[in-house]
């Protein structure tokens, strides 16, 4: 009976029909250097639920004649710790999303708060998340071209995020969304934080299979935790598999933090990509590259694919400085095969 009430209410969305709803909407106007948010709920129409979590439901919707996703978070009144945590995550997600604007970051549209249900309205991403996409693929079936296109979208979004001083802290394939054009956008900023404030929060954040060892151990960390997570995501793209398959999340965390284990690199993986993945998930955060480097490297690899040049190795004589320069970018930095002019 309790579960039935929780799931229906009779529907969470019915709460938004009531009065006294506190709302925000993206606006160009500002007052006292603080953006204001005012949503017109009479323009919001909520459709079918298409995803759910422990405390949230995500519905398709129409807002001002635009397809949207409506994330609703139900705040429990009887569990104080959970209530405080969910309210903090909601506040943080709205504060960050409303200030981010990039083609590879999911676009914030509006938000509303009517206890016990809070909602965040974002653009609708019709093709679901990257994990769903990979689940439909045969292992190791993605072409190098596809891997690079998806990886570049993610790394462009993360480069922008870090340029804004934001650490995502839960970068994983489930939080990477695909639109009609199969472009990727980074989403779900509930556990994100400004770099200057991140260390104030206690405990580890994120999801164990993608979590950096320093965060698992609850040690001091930097934006490089996102680079580690990106390394795991890049491995997912090359394999289409779930990282640490066959392990529970806790077993995966123990393997990473205490045994320095990583998902097995498939022999079919391009050596250049394998080298980049290993750099991203290095145990020492200082040895991980930043996203500006990752973007530059992936763009070089993408150019190689378009030019029909090898990504992993090259032997023999090459004529022409232009081709030589391209090949230098294409040759894996871990390769011992020299490139001769």
Image (tube, rainbow, N blue to C red):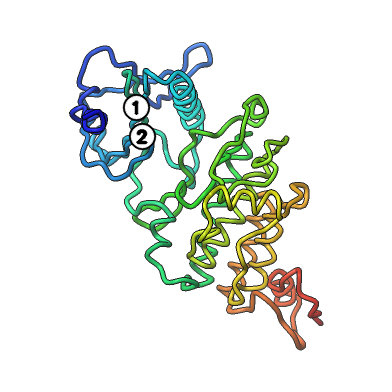
Query: What is the number of the mark on residue 95?
Result: none
**Rendered view: 94 above or below 206:** above
Identify the residue shown where x is 50% and y is 42%. Answer: 102
Q: Residues within 10 Å of mark 2 (few under 14, many from 20)?
A: some
Looking at the rendered structure, the secondary structure element under dot 1 is strand
| Nearest to the observer: residue 322 or residue 311 | 311
Q: Name the image quarter holding residue 162.
A: top right
Looking at the rendered structure, the secondary structure element under dot 2 is strand
Q: Quarter of the image containing the C terminus?
A: bottom right
Query: What is the number of the mark on residue 56?
Result: 2
Q: Are marks 2 and 1 in contact (CB under 8 Å)?
A: yes
Q: Residue 241's x, y, as percent?
A: 49, 64
Locate residue 290 relative to residue 19 in the image: left or right: right
**Rendered view: 187 above or below 232:** above
Q: Residues within 10 Å of mark 1 (few under 14, many from 20)?
A: many
Identify the residue shown where x is 42% and y is 71%. Answer: 138
Identify the residue shown where x is 23% and y is 13%. Answer: 19
| Nearest to the observer: residue 31 or residue 119 | 119
Q: Number of marks in the image?
A: 2
Q: Quarter of the image containing the N terminus?
A: top left
CA gap, disc 2 to disc 1?
6 Å
N-term-proximal mark, 2 vs 1: 2
Q: Residue 125's x, y, as percent?
A: 35, 48
Query: What is the number of the mark on residue 74?
Result: 1
Q: Residue 258's x, y, as percent?
A: 70, 50
Q: Residue 4's x, y, as percent?
A: 21, 32
Locate residue 293 relative to residue 73 in the image: left or right: right
Q: Name the image quarter holding residue 298.
A: bottom right
């Amino acid at each position: 009976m309790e579960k039935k009430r929780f799931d229906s209410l009779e529907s969470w969305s019915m709460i938004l029909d009531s009065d006294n709803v506190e709302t925000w909407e993206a606006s160009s106007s500002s007052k006292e250097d603080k953006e204001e948010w005012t949503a017109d709920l009479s323009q919001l129409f909520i459709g079918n639920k298409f995803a759910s979590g422990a405390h949230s439901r995500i519905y398709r919707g129409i807002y001002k004649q635009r397809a949207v996703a409506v994330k609703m978070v139900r705040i429990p009144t009887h569990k104080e710790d959970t209530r405080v945590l969910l309210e903090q995550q909601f506040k943080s997600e709205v504060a960050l999303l409303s200030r981010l604007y990039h083609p590879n970051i999911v676009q914030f549209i509006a938000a509303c708060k009517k206890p016990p249900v809070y909602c965040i309205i974002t653009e609708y991403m019709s093709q679901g998340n990257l994990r769903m996409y990979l689940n439909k693929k045969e292992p190791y079936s993605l072409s190098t071209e596809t891997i690079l296109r998806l990886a570049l979208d993610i790394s462009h979004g993360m480069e922008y995020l870090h340029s804004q001083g934001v650490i995502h802290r839960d970068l994983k394939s489930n939080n990477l969304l695909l639109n009609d054009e199969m472009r990727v956008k980074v989403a779900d900023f509930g556990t994100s934080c400004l770099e200057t404030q991140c260390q104030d929060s206690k405990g580890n954040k994120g999801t164990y299979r993608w979590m950096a060892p320093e965060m698992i151990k609850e040690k001091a960390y930097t934006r490089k935790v996102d680079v580690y997570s990106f390394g795991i995501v890049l491995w997912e793209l090359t394999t289409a598999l779930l990282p640490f398959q066959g392990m529970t999340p806790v077993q995966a965390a123990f393997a990473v933090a205490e045994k320095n284990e990583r998902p097995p690199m498939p022999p079919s993986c391009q050596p250049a990509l394998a080298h980049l993945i290993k750099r991203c998930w290095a145990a020492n955060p200082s040895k991980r590259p930043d996203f500006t480097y990752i973007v530059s490297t992936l763009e070089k690899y993408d150019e190689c694919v378009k030019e029909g040049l090898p990504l992993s190795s090259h032997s023999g004589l090459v004529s022409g400085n232009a081709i030589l320069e391209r090949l230098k970018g294409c040759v894996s930095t871990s390769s011992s095969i020299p490139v001769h002019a």
